[in-house]
Amino acid sequence: MIARRNAALLFALMLVAWCVPERGQIAGLTPSSTPASAQPSAPPDALGRENPRGGMIGFIKAAQEERYNIAVQYFQPVTGRRRPAPDEEEELASQLLTILNQKFAGPLGPKSAPTSSLC
């Protein structure tokens, strides 16, 4: 039980760290060698993970709707470690949602706050 709680807490911390922008992610701070129109566009992500906020919102919505099989698709295992069994991942998603519901309050919708204040 403690190991699962620690894993859920570790995952929550990883998600928060994922929200911190890096210098390479901020438009205009890195020189572009090719024009934007010449760069191929990436295909849209089926889970809406175009940015950290989209990933968090998608995970929370899926978990709140108890669609844990979808929610676990937002997890990314650490390289070199075994991926837990599907039922273990779904339990981890449930535990993470419980932690998020206990520790965070307020709306997460697209108009709830300026994008600069979240992630």
Image (cartoon, rainbow, N blue to C red):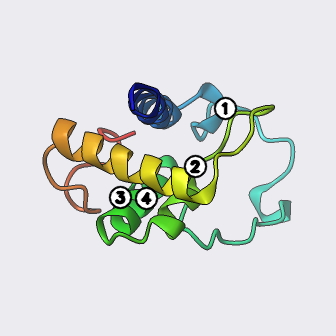
Q: Which of pointers 1 and 2 indicates the residue nearer the eye?
A: 2
- Residue 114, x across and y down, in percent: 27, 48
Amino acid under disc 1: Gly
- As helix, strand or loop, the secondary structure at mark 4 comes to helix
Residue at 64% from the left image edge and 53% from the top image edge: 85
Tags 3 and 4 touching, CB below 8 Å: yes
The answer to whether residue 101 is left or right of residue 88 is left
Mark 4 closeness class: few <14, some 14–19, many ≥20 residues within 10 Å:
many
Q: Amino acid at mark 4?
A: Phe
Q: Residue at x 23, y 61 (%)?
A: 111
Which of the two discs, 1 and 2, labels the residue nearer the N terminus?
1
Disc on res. 59: 4
| Residue 109 left/right relative to 73 | left
Checking the image for residue 75, the label placed there is 2
Q: Return the residue at label 3.
A: 60
Kind of residue sitting beneath label 2: Phe
Indicate the secondary structure of the residue bearing disc 1: helix
Report the amino acid beneath label 3. Ile
Direction left: furthest residue: 106
Give the residue at mark 1.
Answer: 24
How crowded pointer 3 is (Cα within 10 Å; few <14, some 14-19, many 20+) is rated as: many
- Circle nearer the N terminus (4, 1): 1
C-alpha span from label 3 to label 4: 4 Å
Task: Compute the Cα span from label 4 to label 2.
Answer: 9 Å
Residue 48 x %, y %:
53, 67
The image shows residue 92 at horizontal and vertical percentages of: 45, 46
